[in-house]
């Protein structure tokens, strides 16, 4: 199959058939997020439950179930940091699959989550150096990864908000990568290898999917992701990311610089360079 855990993974709790998305209120703006994107998640996954969580819902989740984390959560200087943290807590508390609002799906998720207790997606290729994404992931409730993620969030909570790279580091996908490194007890500088990921799959039911399935294009090639023609995405694509990134002030030269760094083989291209400004208020 295309996803799933190993023999050890099947002994762990399965992912609930539940889809989560978040926005500041119950009305994501159509100018940013095409309604057909959200509808597609439900259409191709019949029998799955769906919930859109608002900022108020997320705050209540933290207040009710993670009170020790509440001061840190409220102290984050930008809404995207709270949205990042909330999606991890949703996965820990309820399980299911989280999607950013700018995802569109073409085929059922079932083959990807069968037999796994936690599913992550590469952002590019199948090389972990390219990073795991926090724009889509799935989990069983109370999976051990999320306790480690909470520790990383606490460790990085005082990161100054100097640009979008600070968000990636303090609450974004870099947090997932660090949590996996801690689960593997890696030494500084030691790289995550394929055998290590196999061990995580066998012991904790963690599956890391090739980017062709859920991330068929990169942010720097977002024009491709906007095309709906079947021939312009990999046939294996189950979903695609449209990269709206409503939380940053976009800058074409910065995007071009990131793409150049990727081509040159920089494994942390998105965390390098001048970076983009972070919006400290969700004006939508």
Image: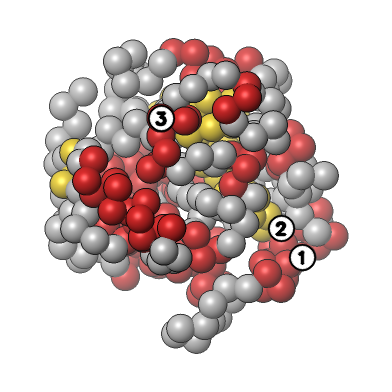
Mark 2 or 3: in front is 3
Name which residue lies at 59% across and 47% down.
Answer: 211
Image quadrant assignment for residue 185 = bottom right
Which label number is shown at residue 205?
2
Which label number is shown at residue 202?
1
Question: How many dots with numbers?
Answer: 3
Where's residue 272, x and y in %?
28, 63
Q: Is mark 2 on a helix, strand or loop?
A: loop
Q: In this view, does 69 lie above or below 3?
A: below
Name which residue lies at 46% across and 83% down.
Answer: 189
Where's residue 62, x and y in %?
35, 45
Q: Is residue 122 visible?
A: yes
Outermost residue on the right side: it is 7
**Distance (Cα) linking label 1 and label 3:** 38 Å
Characterize the local packing of mark 3: few (<14), some (14-19) or many (20 or more) Cα atoms within 10 angstroms: few
Whether tag 1 and tag 3 are in contact, CB under 8 A, the answer is no
Q: In this view, does 8 lie above or below 193?
A: above
Q: What element carries label 3?
A: helix
Mark 1 or 3: in front is 3
Residue topped by disc 3: 223
């Amino acid at each position: 199959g295309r996803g799933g855990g190993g023999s050890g993974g099947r002994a762990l709790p399965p992912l609930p058939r539940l889809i989560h998305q978040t926005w500041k209120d119950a009305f994501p703006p159509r100018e940013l997020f095409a309604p057909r994107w959200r509808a597609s998640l439900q259409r191709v996954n019949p029998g799955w439950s769906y919930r859109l969580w608002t900022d108020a819902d997320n705050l209540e989740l933290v207040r009710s179930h993670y009170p020790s984390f509440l001061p840190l959560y409220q102290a984050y200087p930008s809404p995207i940091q709270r949205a990042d943290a909330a999606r991890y807590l949703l996965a820990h508390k309820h399980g299911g699959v989280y999607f950013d609002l700018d995802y569109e799906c073409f085929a059922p998720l079932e083959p990807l989550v069968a037999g796994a207790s936690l599913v992550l997606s590469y952002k590019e290729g199948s090389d972990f150096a390219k990073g795991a994404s926090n724009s889509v992931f799935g989990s069983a409730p109370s999976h051990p990864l999320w306790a480690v993620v909470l520790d990383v969030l606490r460790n990085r909570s005082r990161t100054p908000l100097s640009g979008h790279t600070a968000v990636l580091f303090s609450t974004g996908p870099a947090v997932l990568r660090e949590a996996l490194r801690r689960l593997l007890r890696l030494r500084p500088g030691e790289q995550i290898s394929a055998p290590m990921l196999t061990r995580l799959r066998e012991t904790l039911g963690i599956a890391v999917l090739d980017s062709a399935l859920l991330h068929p294009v990169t942010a720097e090639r977002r024009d491709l992701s906007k095309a709906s023609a079947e021939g312009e995405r990999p046939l294996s694509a189950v979903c695609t990311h449209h990269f709206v990134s409503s939380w940053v002030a976009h800058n074409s030269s910065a995007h071009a610089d990131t793409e150049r760094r990727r081509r040159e083989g920089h494994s942390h291209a998105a965390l390098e360079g001048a970076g983009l400004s972070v919006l400290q208020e969700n004006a939508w």
